[in-house]
Structures are given as structure tokens and as C-alpha cells.
Image (cartoon, rainbow, N blue to C red):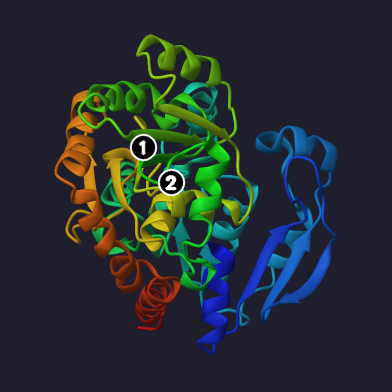
């Protein structure tokens, strides 16, 4: 998201500099130093304890060269955009912007939510120790994907004048069309006459398969050629998924496709008639759902992973996270045939509201407003 936004801003004539670390993922480090990527000036800072940072990023992620660089940003930038929720780099940026009177806009991208399990404990402790609420109140602007994220900012002390709701966006030029539909179906043994509901995400309880599979079972007898295709890598919940499939006797109706990588996900979207994600915990916008809409697929989503504007654009349903509500929406899609109507509206909706160009422009307007307030 940050790359696509930055690239778009550069194409609009802005100068964009990114401060980040050289930690690529949990296994790799990239080179330190400066490089230019699509016109974006990128500085990568190394961690003092790189091995520990890879294993325990919540404790040891600290690209210390970044702090020194942040101490001399006055006069170089008109606004600083933080695209992260927690961590020392967030605190450093907030403190230095306050000292140097540079406006700061914060996009938490869902990261300020309470979370679940061990993550919930860590986040609560972090927010108490490092005064996250104070940072939220001090920000000049707060960008929320959804109304729920806006409410999260308010719970931390943010006020309405700080908050602007701007959705996630995608680069429509990345979408390859539907030429991979038949090959993906053939690989999974799905017939051309079958209708397909696609789940694409981590196989984890937070993604809601414990709701989707029973809901699918409720309508499957009424739609005999309907299949549920589950695409994703196991994140500790696959045994439960097998158990649910057996419990509801859906072995011949549910297809476990395993993970897909890179552009292969577009073949999965193309092969589907409807995209469905039923998270029971708030994760804000589902980027997979936005991509599915871009591929002209309607969606059934729970409110915990909604795409703002989806229902108003007649591209699908946003429902409560319970089996009955999900089953009712799936029944409407396939018993009444509205999935086709939703899909017909979906690409136009994304083009108007969720293209990276439209989303980048909305950020620019908000940045200009924030800078104008400071100048006055």
C-alpha cells in the first residue's frame, strides 16, 4: 500500500522520501543505504541487533540510524506520513516532528486494534508503557480505512477534526483479467458448470472458516452445483477445518486448494463466482476483497473485514459475523442469482472509489489541509 501510494504521489509531481529498515521479512535482511525506486527516494536503516530483531521484532526492532536522520528533517519535508501502528520508529517520528514543528499524519492500517491472544496482551502493555493515546492525540491527522478504525482512534483520544476516512486502494493495472479461470478450475477438478465461492486468506480462526463452512453447508443442499474453494496457507487451524468439513459432510463440496503465490491469486479470483471472507474479529478492510471486486467478483463479507461502500454500490453484502447471517447472504447470492449482478458492478466501483489513483488524491487533499492549518 505504501509503495503504491508513494509511486502515485511521485507521478503527480511530489517529492517522496521513505525511511524504513533493511529487515525484509522474518528470514532476510536487505542492503542498507539509499536507493531510488520508481522515483521514490528510499533510505533503509539497519538494526543494532538484526538476528534478535528478526526473531522478536516487537522487542528488538530498532533501526537506530533512523533516529539520527529524523533529528534533522526540519526544512526538508512538508508533512510526515506514518504508516505503522507501534514501534520505536513511530515514537521517534512523532517526537521529532513535534520538536521540529512538522505536521504528522498517521495511518495505523488496522494495527491499533486490540488484537487477540498474545498479541492483545502485548499491545495493551505497549500502549500503557509508551503512551500510545498521547501519540494519537498529538497527531495532526489520522487516516482511517473504516468507521470502526475511526472509532478506534477516538477510543485513544482522537477527535473528529483529526480523522479522515480514506479506504485502501489497489493498482488496477496489476489485474490481469480472467484468462487463468479455466486452468485454475481444471487443476482443482472443478467443472465448468460448477458455481464457486472463494475464500482466500490465512487458515486461521480469525479469518472465520468456523463460520463460513457451516453457513455453506446450510445452503449447499439448495444449490447442488455449488463449491467452496479455500485458498491459503495453514496458520494453525487446518485440522479444525478438516474437522468442520467432515462434521458437515462436505467432503465433496469443499476444495482445499492450499496456498497460492504472487499473481497466481488472480487466477483464483478469476475462477470464482463470489468472494467470501467471514472474519469474527476486526481486521478492517480486506485487501483480498478489494482485489476480487477489481476482478469483477461480488463479495459477502462480515462487518469486521468490510469494504466501505460495497453495499451502496450493489457489489455484495456486509453481514454480522454469525452463521445464520452469512448463510442468508450466500443464499441470496446463488438462489436468486444476484452474485452475477454484484460482480457486474464491482469493477466500476473499484475504478471510481478504490483505485490507487483515487485514494492517493484523497491523501493529497488531506495532507494539503493539514499543512494549511499549520501555516495559519
Give the vertical position of 109 relative to 283 (above or below): below
Above or below, comparing residue 292 to residue 365 in the picture? above
Q: What is the spatial separation of the Cα atoms under label 2 and label 1, in whole angstroms? A: 8 Å
> Dot 2 corresponds to which residue?
110
| In-front residue for pair 102/151 | 151
Q: Is residue 99 visible?
A: no
Residue 373 visible in rendering: yes
Which quadrant holds residue 94?
Answer: bottom right
- The picture places residue 9, in percent across and down from the top left corner, at 52, 80
Looking at the image, residue 261 sits to the left or right of residue 295; the answer is right
Mark 2 and mark 1 in contact? Answer it, CB < 8 Å. yes
Front in this rendered view, residue 347 or 226? 226
| Residue 19 locus on image (x, y percent) | 68, 65
Residue count near mark 2 (Cα–Cα under 10 Å), binned few <14, some 14–19, many ≥20:
many
Please name the residue shown 20% across and 57% down the image: 341
Residue closest to the eye, 103 or 293: 293
Q: Which element carries disc 1, helix, strand or loop?
A: loop
Give left or right: position of 203 versus 138. Answer: right
| Residue that badge 1 annotates | 282
Point 27% across, 40% down: residue: 303
Would you identify the image quadrant in which residue 219 lies? top left
Label number found at residue 129 = none
Q: Residues within 10 Å of mark 1 (few under 14, many from 20)?
A: many
Where residue 276 sits, quadrant-wise, is top left
Q: How many marks?
A: 2
In the rendered image, which quarter contains the C terminus?
Answer: bottom left
Image spot of residue 105 (x, y percent): 45, 64
Amino acid at each position: 500500500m505504501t509503495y503504491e501510494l508513494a509511486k502515485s504521489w511521485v507521478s503527480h509531481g511530489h517529492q517522496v522520501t521513505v525511511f524504513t529498515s533493511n529487515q525484509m521479512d522474518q528470514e532476510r535482511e536487505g542492503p542498507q543505504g539509499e536507493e531510488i525506486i520508481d522515483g521514490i527516494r528510499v533510505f533503509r536503516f539497519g538494526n543494532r541487533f538484526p538476528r534478535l530483531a528478526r526473531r522478536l521484532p516487537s522487542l528488538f526492532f530498532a533501526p537506530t540510524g533512523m533516529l539520527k536522520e529524523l533529528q534533522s528533517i526540519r526544512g526538508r519535508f512538508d508533512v510526515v506520513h506514518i504508516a505503522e501502528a507501534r514501534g520505536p520508529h513511530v515514537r521517534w517520528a512523532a517526537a521529532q516532528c513535534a520538536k521540529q514543528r512538522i505536521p504528522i499524519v498517521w495511518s495505523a492500517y488496522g494495527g491499533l486494534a486490540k488484537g487477540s491472544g498474545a498479541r492483545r496482551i502485548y499491545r495493551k502493555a505497549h500502549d500503557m508503557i509508551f503512551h500510545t493515546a498521547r501519540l494519537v492525540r498529538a497527531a495532526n491527522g489520522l487516516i482511517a480505512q473504516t468507521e470502526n478504525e475511526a472509532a478506534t482512534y477516538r477510543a485513544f483520544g482522537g477527535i473528529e477534526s483529526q480523522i479522515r476516512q480514506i479506504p485502501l486502494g489497489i493498482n488496477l493495472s496489476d489485474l490481469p483479467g480472467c484468462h487463468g479461470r479455466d486452468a485454475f478450475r481444471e487443476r482443482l477438478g472443478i467443472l465448468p458448470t460448477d458455481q464457486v465461492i472463494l475464500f482466500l486468506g490465512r487458515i486461521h480462526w480469525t479469518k472465520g472458516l468456523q463460520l463460513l463452512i457451516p453457513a455453506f453447508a446450510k445452503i449447499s443442499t439448495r444449490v447442488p452445483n455449488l463449491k467452496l474453494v479455500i485458498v491459503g496457507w495453514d496458520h494453525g487451524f487446518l485440522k479444525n477445518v478438516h474437522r468442520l468439513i467432515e462434521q458437515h459432510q462436505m467432503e465433496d463440496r469443499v476444495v482445499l486448494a492450499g496456498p497460492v503465490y504472487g499473481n497466481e491469486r488472480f487466477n483464483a479470483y478469476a475462477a470464482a463466482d463470489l468472494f467470501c471472507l467471514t472474519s469474527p474479529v476486526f481486521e478492517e478492510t480486506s485487501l483480498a476483497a478489494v482485489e476480487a471486486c477489481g476482478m469483477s467478483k461480488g463479495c459477502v463479507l462480515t462487518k469486521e473485514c468490510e469494504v466501505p461502500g460495497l453495499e451502496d454500490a450493489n457489489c455484495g453484502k456486509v453481514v454480522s459475523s454469525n452463521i445464520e447471517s452469512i448463510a442468508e447472504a450466500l443464499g441470496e447470492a446463488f438462489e436468486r442469482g444476484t452474485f452475477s449482478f454484484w460482480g457486474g458492478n464491482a469493477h466500476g466501483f473499484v475504478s471510481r472509489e478504490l483505485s490507487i489513483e483515487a485514494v492517493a488524491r484523497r491523501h493529497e487533499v488531506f495532507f494539503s489541509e493539514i499543512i494549511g492549518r499549520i501555516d495559519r
